[in-house]
Image (cartoon, grey):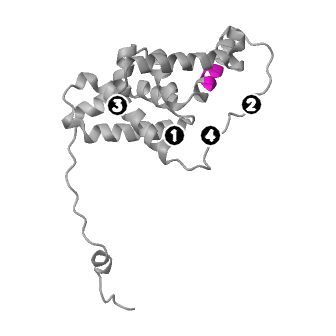
């Protein structure tokens, strides 16, 4: 039997890491618990992939957590997080690899004529596919205007653009949606 020469070799090889105490914000936890479903819907509308949406929301919430003490008006948190979502998505889009792209969904098997709720779901899915075809900026404006139900002024404030920009971009986006062949049965 051999006796070890140095029993503390493993601890000597790795330097001691000092961990700084992280502040705890119970109000942040409560905010996330209450608003996560709504914020996740917003994130999903900005990305083509549900997994990317979860990552996007996580990143935006991490940025919000870091800035929690600096946020003066906690009544405006939704706007702050939405802005973080849009900014983070824009940064991700700029840094994307050229060879990465979102695949179209696999086609659903043919089903007999569906009842009313199924037709509504199909229309809903077709609408989302059409929205996902829009450029990122127009998609963000349409989602904030019609799915988040923000006014033109609120949408402009969240995105940091003028109200006229929101009006014209939303008008162009709606024009593209009207021309989408998948949405022809709606007209």
* Secondary element at image label 3: helix
Helix, strand or loop at disc 1? Answer: helix
Q: Residue furthest bottom?
A: 2
- Rendered residue at 58%/24% (across/down): 131
Q: Secondary structure at mark 4?
A: loop
| Structural distance between the alpha carbons of marks 1 and 2 | 21 Å
Report the residue at 55% width, 19% height from top.
Answer: 172
The dot on residue 52 is 1
Answer few, some or many: residues within 10 Å of disc 3's Cα (few below 14, many 20 plus, some between 14 and 19): some
The image's mark for residue 102 is 4
Task: Point out residue 12 in the picture as x, y percentages from the top left corner.
Answer: 27, 78
**Dot 1 or dot 4, earlier in sequence:** 1
Q: Between tags 1 and 4, which lies in front? A: 4
Horizontal arrangement in the rendering, residue 156 relative to residue 139 (left or right)? left
Q: Crowding at label 4, few (<14), some or many (≥20) Cα neighbours within 10 Å?
A: few
Q: Which residue is mark 3?
A: 81
Front label number (2 vs 3): 3
**How far apart are the two marked residues, 1 and 4, measured between alpha carbons?**
11 Å
Stretch of the chain drawn in magenta: 125-130
Left or right, residue 25 beside residue 124: left
Q: Is residue 124 visible?
A: no
Residue 137 in picture, x, y percent from top left: 48, 29
Spatial CA distance of label 1 from label 3 is 16 Å
- 37 to 163, vertically: above or below: below
Whole-percent x, y for residue 86 in the image = 42, 33
Q: Are marks 4 and 3 in contact (CB under 8 Å)?
A: no
Residue ID for mark 2: 107
């Amino acid at each position: 039997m051999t006796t070890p020469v140095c029993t503390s070799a493993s601890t000597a090889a790795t330097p001691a890491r000092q961990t700084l105490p992280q502040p705890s914000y119970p109000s942040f936890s409560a905010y996330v618990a209450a608003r996560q479903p709504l914020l996740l819907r917003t994130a999903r509308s900005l990305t083509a992939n549900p997994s990317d949406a979860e990552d996007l929301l996580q990143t935006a919430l991490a940025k919000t957590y870091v800035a929690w003490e600096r946020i003066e008006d906690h009544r405006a948190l939704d706007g702050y997080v939405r802005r973080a979502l849009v900014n983070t998505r824009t940064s991700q889009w700029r840094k994307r690899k050229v060879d990465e792209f979102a695949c179209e969904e696999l086609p659903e098997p043919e089903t007999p004529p569906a009842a009313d709720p199924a037709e509504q779901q199909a229309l809903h899915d077709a609408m989302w596919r059409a929205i996902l075809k829009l450029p990122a900026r127009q998609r963000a404006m349409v989602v904030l205007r019609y799915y988040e139900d923000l006014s033109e002024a609120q949408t402009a404030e969240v995105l940091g653009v003028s109200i006229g920009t929101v009006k014209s971009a939303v008008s162009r986006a709606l024009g593209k949606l009207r021309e989408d062949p998948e949405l022809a049965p709606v007209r």
